Amino acid sequence: MAGIIVAFPKVEDAKNIKNLLVRNGFSVSDVCTTGAQAIGLADSYGKGIVICGYRLPDMIYQELYGCLPPEFEMLLMASQHILAECMDNDVICLSMPVKVLDLVNTVDMLLQTIQRRHRRMRGAPRERSGEEIRLIHEAKYLLMDRNHMTEEEAYRYIQKCSMDSGTKLEETARMVLSMMK
């Protein structure tokens, strides 16, 4: 689950935003008043949203954004004239005073974005190490040599055995090598 961190210089403002979100069904992880606290909390959650004002006691929003983990989104809440300067970056902005519906819809959209990104990254194939690639190639060339298969047939054979046995491709290649040597 993504963490929602609310960071404003005045703790009352942060608590008001938190209460607004909680009343609308969101689980706010933490409230803080400095950028350093927000960064520490973000590092512990791994992914989520930081909702903050333009200036915190120890840094401005750009410095905070630069220190957040890449899986974090930022929602900047500030006056319209300050937001006019902030539109050229990846930070999502809402003008103050904020409308409850705008805040709720924006936070919901950001959470959905984080979930989509997480699903996409989870589904991406992992990179094989050099040793794993070497094992697969060695098993493939052994099958080609001994069983007179083409390179594609040998690879498909290893792949099919891997799927049938429910093991990883490199584990299957290791079994082929141990059985045929």
Image (tube, rainbow, N blue to C red):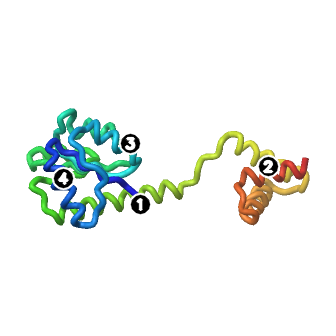
The earlier-in-sequence mark between 3 and 4 is: 4
The earlier-in-sequence mark between 1 and 4 is: 4
Would residue 151 be found to the left or right of residue 26 on screen?
right
Nearer mark to the viewer, of 1 and 4: 4
Name the residue rendered at 44%, 56% in the picture.
Answer: 118
Q: Label 1 to label 3, Cα distance in Å?
A: 20 Å
Q: Which mark is residue 116?
A: 1
As drawn, the residue found furthest toward the top would be 58
Name the residue rendered at 21%, 48% in the picture.
Answer: 76
20, 65: nearer the viewer: 20
Nearer mark to the viewer, of 2 and 3: 3
Q: Position of residue 87 (x, y in %)?
A: 20, 47
Q: Which mark is residue 43?
A: 3
Q: Looking at the figure, which quarter contains the N terminus?
A: bottom left
Q: Which mark is residue 15?
A: 4
What's under tag 1, amino acid-wise? Arg
Q: Label 2 to label 1, Cα distance in Å?
A: 35 Å
Please identify the quarter of the rendering in which residue 18 is found.
Answer: bottom left
Label 4: few (<14), some (14–19) or many (≥20) C-alpha neighbours in 10 Å: some
What's under tag 3, amino acid-wise? Asp
The earlier-in-sequence mark between 1 and 3 is: 3
What is the number of callouts on the image?
Answer: 4
Q: Position of residue 144 (x, y in %)?
A: 85, 52
Find disc 2 in the rendering and name its residue. 174
